[in-house]
Image (cartoon, rainbow, N blue to C red):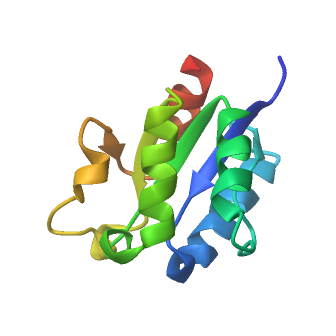
Amino acid sequence: MAKKRIFISFAIEDVTLRDFLVGQAKNKNSPFEFTDMSVKKPWDAAWKTNCRRKIKGCDGMIIIVTKNTKNADGQLWEINCAKEESIPRRGIYGSTDNRPATLPKELDGVRVVSWTWDNIKNWIDSL
């Protein structure tokens, strides 16, 4: 089975969590695998056009949700873009101690689950 193309949306303050998720997928014991399509560096003024193109080419989007999400304008734009492009989205909490008290409106209708191999694998397998 071909690897799924997954866009990882994260607040720049949570880049370490994105790195952990990518590393987890590369672990030989990991029950899931995907090709990371996240934005790894800021783009120029045309970043939204480039980002939309990347998102449209993905099978799904994993959204790393932390207390930083509500103030992460770029991440919130990515989430809305995926919704506009009908890309399946799944939120995962970055950690139990960094969960936001409330979710931003951009996550309305998005299921947000604990970060476990099973939760990630089952969702990726469903794409």
Residue 9 in percent (x, y) is at: 55, 57
Q: Quadrant of the C terminus?
A: top right
Does the image show residue 89? no
Q: Quadrant of the N terminus?
A: top right
Residue drawn at the location 45% of the way across and 49% of the way down: 79
Which residue is outermost to the bottom? 13
Tell me if 69 is positioned left or right of 118 in this view.
Answer: left
Residue 30: image x %, image y %? 71, 43
Taking the image as shown, residue 24 lies to the left or right of residue 27, namely left
Pinpoint residue 96: horizontal percent, then vertical percent.
31, 67
Q: In this orientation, which residue lies closer to the viewer: 29 or 37?
A: 37
Q: Quadrant of residue 90?
A: top left
Residue lying furthest front: 45
Q: Residue 43 occupies which quadrant of the picture? A: bottom right
The residue under the point 81% across, 51% down is 26
Res. 52 in view: yes
Q: Residue at x 23, y 69 (%)?
A: 100
Residue in the picture at 58% in, 33% down: 121
- The foreground one among 35 and 21 is 35
- Taking 78 as reference, is 14 above or below it? below
| Number of numbered labels in the structure image | 0
